[in-house]
Image (cartoon, grey):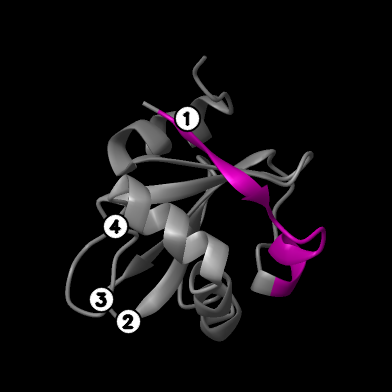
Amino acid sequence: MFLKAPFGLPADFLRTFGYPGQRRYIGLYWSPMGDEACWDDGQSSACGLADNHYYLAFIRRKEVLAWRDENGLHLGNSEEEAQHWLVVDAETCEVYAAHWREARQAVIRQEIPS
């Protein structure tokens, strides 16, 4: 099940974050291996090549924290793998969350399920 966030990304988020690709849907999460922000676009993925501080600043914003807490979203931390990923739409700047398995399939297919 995909949950749409009541907020969007800043227009330059993906570029500033360090995502180098051109895919529409990109999964974002935190990995304890290396303690780093990660991205996955269904064709490529990377951990540690993105701006960790920029990612953390975003997911710690007041409205993002409230949404995460309200919906029991776990995006990973220094000691635990992510249970959920953020899936961002590079065209609309919309943000979704889903269990990592569903999110991974969506970025591979480049489609958010209805």
Q: Is residue 15 magenta?
A: yes
Estimate the spatial distance between the alpha carbons at disc 1 and disc 4, rounded to whole Å: 18 Å
Hey, which residue is sitting farthest left in the picture?
A: 79
Tell me: residue 93, above or below residue 14: above
Observer-nearest of 46 and 80: 80
* Label 1 sits on residue: 106
Is 81 drawn above or below residue 49 in the view shown?
Answer: above
* Amino acid type assigned to the residue bearing label 3 in the image: Met
- In the depicted view, which residue is nearer to us: 32 or 75? 75
Q: Which residue is mark 4?
A: 74
Q: Which residue is mark 3?
A: 33
Q: Nearer the viewer, mark 4 or mark 3?
A: 4
Q: Mark 2 — residue?
A: 35
User: Where does the image place residue 114, in percent across and percent down from the top left?
Assistant: 52, 14
In-image side of 49 versus 72 (left or right): right
Q: Nearer the viewer, mark 1 or mark 4?
A: 4
Q: Which amino acid, by three-letter code, is at mark 2?
A: Asp
Chain part drawn in magenta: 2-16
Q: Residue 32 location in percent, x, y?
A: 25, 75
Q: Do the numbered discs 1 and 4 sit on residues whose CB atoms are within 8 Å?
A: no
> Under tag 1, what secondary structure?
helix
Task: Give the spatial CA distance, label 1 vs label 3.
Answer: 23 Å
Residue at 73% across / 45% down in the picture? 90
- Type of amino acid at the residue the image marks with label 4: His
Horizontal side, residue 54 vs residue 30: left or right: right
Give the answer, above or below, for where 93 lies relative to 53: above
Disc 2: CA contacts within 10 A as few (<14), some (14-19) or many (>=20):
some
Q: Amino acid at mark 1?
A: Ala
Asked if marks 3 and 2 touch (Cβ < 8 Å), the reply is: yes
